[in-house]
Image (tube, grey):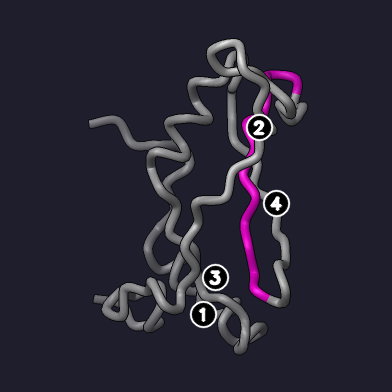
């Protein structure tokens, strides 16, 4: 089994998420991202990665996802099936309330 070069140790992830919760105690803790959203972005011509922007909607934290091409440029206003679309996505569900209350990334406790 090949290990991803982007895989980090669980303890590192716990340390980072614990530091976030300490620094931003009243902020959102995480976002659950719908896999259909990611799959739709991957179907956009030229997609080599995905960029995530932070946003606010009436005080609620949001993520705006956009496909990115090989040159590092956001793919905005692409077409799908000949129809223009914005190229930006928001299918993210914030935690709370969609938290996994048993996750060490939320509790800060290693299994």
Using the numbered discs, state the Cα–Cα distance from disc 1 to disc 2 in whole angstroms: 33 Å
Relative image position of residue 17 (x, y in whole percent): 51, 73
The residue pinned by badge 1 equals 18
Crowd around label 4: few <14 · some 14–19 · many ≥20 (10 Å): few
Relative image position of residue 13 (x, y in whole percent): 46, 65
The residue pinned by badge 3 equals 16
Chain-order first, disc 2 or disc 3:
3
Chain-order first, disc 1 or disc 2:
1
Q: Nearer the viewer, residue 108 or 58?
A: 58
Which image quadrant is residue 26 in? bottom right
- For residue 47, above or below residue 7: above
Pointer 2 with pointer 4, Cβ within 8 A: no
Task: Tell me what residue is drawn at x 64 percent, y 17 percent.
Answer: 79
The residue pinned by badge 4 equals 53
Relative image position of residue 85 (x, y in whole percent): 65, 28
Give the secondary structure at mark 3: helix
Tell me where the magenta segment starts and ends, as one range. Answer: 60-71
- For residue 33, above or below residue 93: above
Q: Disc number at residue 87? A: 2
Of badges 2 and 3, the one in the foreground is 2
For this orientation, the residue located farthest to the front is 83
Chain-order first, disc 3 or disc 4:
3
Crowd around label 1: few <14 · some 14–19 · many ≥20 (10 Å): many
Give the secondary structure at mark 2: loop
Q: Nearer the viewer, residue 20 or 92?
A: 92
């Amino acid at each position: 089994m090949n290990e991803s070069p982007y895989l980090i140790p669980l303890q590192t992830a716990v340390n980072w998420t614990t530091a976030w919760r300490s620094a931003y105690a009243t902020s959102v803790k995480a976002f659950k991202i719908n896999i259909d959203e990611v799959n739709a972005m991957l179907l956009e011509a030229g997609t080599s990665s995905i960029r995530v922007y932070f946003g606010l909607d009436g005080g609620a934290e949001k993520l705006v996802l956009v496909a990115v091409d090989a040159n590092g440029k956001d793919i905005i206003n692409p077409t799908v099936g000949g129809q223009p679309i914005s190229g930006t996505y928001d299918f993210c569900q914030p935690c709370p309330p969609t938290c996994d209350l048993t996750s060490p990334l939320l509790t800060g406790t290693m299994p």
